[in-house]
Each structure stands twice: as C-alpha cells, then as structure tokens.
Amino acid sequence: MPVDPSVIAALEAAAAAAPDNNALLLHLAGLLLEADRPADALTASAAVLARDPANVEALGVAARAAEASGDAARAEGYRRLYRALGGAGTAAVPEDVPAPRASGGPPPGMPPEEWIPEEEQSQGRVGGMGTLPPLSGARGRDEGPEPMREVGPGHVSDEDARRFADEAFGGGEDASVTLRDVAGMEAVKRRLNVAFLGPMKNPELRAVYGKSLRGGLLLYGPPGCGKTFIARATAGELGARFVTVGLSDVMDMYIGQSERNLHEVFEHARRHRPCVLFFDEIDALGRKRSLRRESGTRDVVNQLLSEMDSLQSDNEGLFILAATNHPWDVDTALRRPGRLDRTLLVLPPDQPAREAILRSRCEGRPLEKIDFGWLAGKTEDYSGADLVHVCESAAENAMEESLTTGKVRPIRMDDFKRALKEVRASVRPWFDTARNYALFANEGGTYDDLIDYLRSRKML
C-alpha cells in the first residue's frame, strides 16, 4: 500500500521540531524507504547513529537505504556492524535487514523463544572501536547457537580489536593535498620542513646529524584557520598514510577499554608506516590531569604518554601531529621533549592566502567583475572558515534575487559587500583569551610567537 505523502510530510515536520527523537526518526526512515526515497531514509537513520552508534534498528534501515541508494560499500559497513551488535540473520542482502519495528518483539523469522530483548542485548555492547560478539539468540535459525566465548563486559580480544581498528581506519587515507595547496603561511611551512619534511626527504643528511624520524608537533591557534588541512598536507608531502583520531575513536564506557582502543590506534598506525597520526582537538583527549575528576580519563592520558614514549614499540616512521584551540589545557607531560615537543602557531591567513581562499571557494560559480584583491584587503583577521562563510553568504544574496525573478544572475561585488556587513571575523574572542595565557603562563617561551603577533597587531 503506497505511503501517504501527507503522513511523511507531517513526520518530517515533527522530526525537524524534535531532531533528538530517535524513535520518530526511525519511523520516518522506514516510511521513506517504502516511499522509494532511500537517500532521505539514509539521512534520517544516519542522524540516529550519530547519537547512538550501537542502535541496531538504525543500522538495519541504514544498510537497506545505502544499498537502495547505490552505495554498496557503505551498506556492507552497516551490515557488518548490524551483525556484530546482534542483528538477526546474516544480512547477506539488504532486504535481509529488517525495517524498524514499531514496538518491541522478535524480528521477522525468529521464534519468540529465541528472542532476547534489547535491554538484555545492550549488556553486550561496548562503544569505541570494539564490540562484543552477537548474542546467541540473535543468530540465524540455520546457523545454530554460537559457541560460548569467555568475554566479560567491556572485554574485546586482541584479534577483534585489531580487526575493528583496520575496518574503522582502513589503513588511513592517502593524503592527496600537499603544502603547495596551502596558500600563504610561509612560516608554518618552513617550520614543518625543518621538523618533518627535510629529514624525511634527505636520509643521508639525516644520518649525518643523527635526526630521528619520530616525534610530534602541536598545531595551535584560533578555530577555522586550517590546522587540519595543514596536517593532511604534511602527510601528502611525506607520501605517508593519514589517520585522523577523534575522541569517539578512543573513549569507551568500560574500564580499561579506552586505553586498549588507544593502544590499537597506535598499533594500527605502526602497521601502516610511514604514517601521520593526527589527533584533532587533542585537549579533549589529553586534557591536563589536574583538571580531570575521573580517574579513568587520567588513565587515558597516561596511556597516550606511554604510546608516545614507545618503550615496547618502535615509533620510527610514525609522525604524530595534534591540533588544538586551547593549548593551555593540554597536559604538560604531553609537551615535554620527545612527545609533542614542538609547537607551531597557525594564525589567520595573510592577504595572499585570503585572496587564494576566496578565489578557490568561488570557482565554478557565476561571477561578474569580482575584485578579489579588494576583498582580501577588507577581510583582515578573518579565518579561513570566515572567508568560506563570506562566499556562501554572497552566493545566497544572489540566489535570493534569482528565486524572486526566476532568472539566474551572477554574483556581483554588491553581494560580497553585503556579505561583509553580515559576516564578521570570529577570531577576536580567541585572541582575547590567548593574550592572558601568553602574558602570564608563558613558561619556557611557549607562546613567544603569539606575543610577537599580538604586538604586531597592537593587541598588547
């Protein structure tokens, strides 16, 4: 029976008003699939998984939606997680994954006596990179019960941990960008060349000076200024794999599992050397232990220190880059020699870089007599993210008129001037906070570069 479009429209309005209602989103996703709207169904189910990665029903509908959308690789990834978390059957094809059920009960094809309620299944879930094996009641009828394994809550075998890490990161990504793609920022490029690129590209000279291919670099500065892009470009220059690590890749609800996840992240990077291991927002993972109340999170910092020291493993060819907007919150032990011992300030783009960013973001759009040099001069202190926002706002201004007239018109300077009135530089609050640390917490000259910049901008 066809789905009434008015019902879907009402549910979409309700979901927009209550975006955190997972049950509502799952119901909507199921109806969207029936209405032959798999892309929208995938978006709705992905929103649920962003908040609840272990939601079996969301994984099921996401697998079906991805397959219907033509994304077979993504569908297979969802099916693997679906089975690992106790989904019914083998899910050999997308249709084998059941749609969300309106109420509790066994999935289609499973006898009621074999069904295990979700509240009991949840005892076998772990977050982070590891998951427990499926419960025996969740296996297909033809497979028979799964042999018992002595796996306690939160415990994942070393083999499973390695397999999940390889599936999660896939050997890292091949960084396709290089420092040539980074406009301006010559001081940053020069420091990176001395710390990493030069020794890597000149092994004979490295041997003469006894320079080791190991160590770490901390990138810090205001948000939106390209720290992640620079890290990826560094990996591209080295011809190395690029693995990004976030808080969700490591932290786990079970005691000891977060440390194991972190260890496997490093082991994964060592297996794919040369590799750039990039910790984004390192202050979240490596926050000062004196500022933490939970002993478990302090243990994660201790594990991170141990992995960087690598008393039992070889870190040669493993380059550790980290980025933060709040370097003063990073544990001081992480910044001692041999760890993240080099600090690099990433500032808002200079004028040549601003012009390059504006040109790049406007490429492929209809333009009429745009003076990018003038715009670059008027956007001092704008971060890269601010400049992208300016371009988007200018495009919206032109599109607004086109929607009214029904005729496409190019983006003009007036659109950019209007956008500049609406979009202001967002970095000033960061500099206001950073100034206090630069003046009163500059142990060992850590923030000398920041002080020089503040003085040049007359902020001191």
Image (cartoon, rainbow, N blue to C red):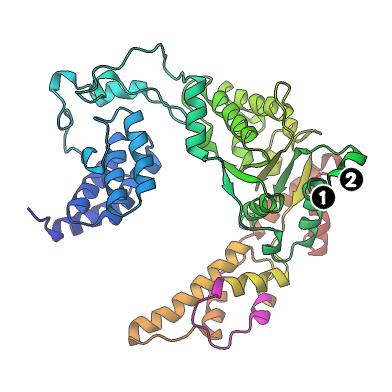
Amino acid of disc 2: Leu
Can you give x and y, in whole percent of width and height, for residue 137 in the image? 24, 20
Amino acid of disc 1: Gly
Magenta highlight on residue 372: yes
Magenta highlight on residue 371: yes
- At 72% across and 26% down in the image, what residue appears? 310
Can you give x and y, in whole percent of width and height, for residue 454 in the image? 79, 58
Front-lying residue, 195 or 167: 167
Front-lying residue, 371 or 42: 42
Does label 1 or label 2 sit earlier along the sequence? 1
Quarter-of-image position of residue 64 = top left
Classify mark 1: helix, strand or loop: helix
Q: Quadrant of the C terminus?
A: bottom right
Can you give x and y, in whole percent of width and height, for residue 230 in the image? 67, 54
Can you give x and y, in whole percent of width and height, for residue 67 in the image? 30, 49
Q: Is residue 371 above or below residue 235?
A: below
Image position of 121 (left or right of 453): left
- The magenta-colored residue range is 361-376
> Do callouts 1 and 2 mark residues in contact (Cβ within 8 Å)?
yes
Indicate which label's residue lies in the foreground, 1 or 2.
Answer: 2
Q: Which residue occupies the extreme right position in the image?
A: 208
The image shows a total of numbered marks equal to 2
Q: Residues within 10 Å of mark 1 (few under 14, many from 20)?
A: some
Q: What residue does disc 1 label? A: 198
Classify mark 2: helix, strand or loop: helix
Q: Residues within 10 Å of mark 2 (few under 14, many from 20)?
A: few
Can residue 375 be seen from the camera position used here? Answer: yes
Q: What residue does disc 2 label? A: 205
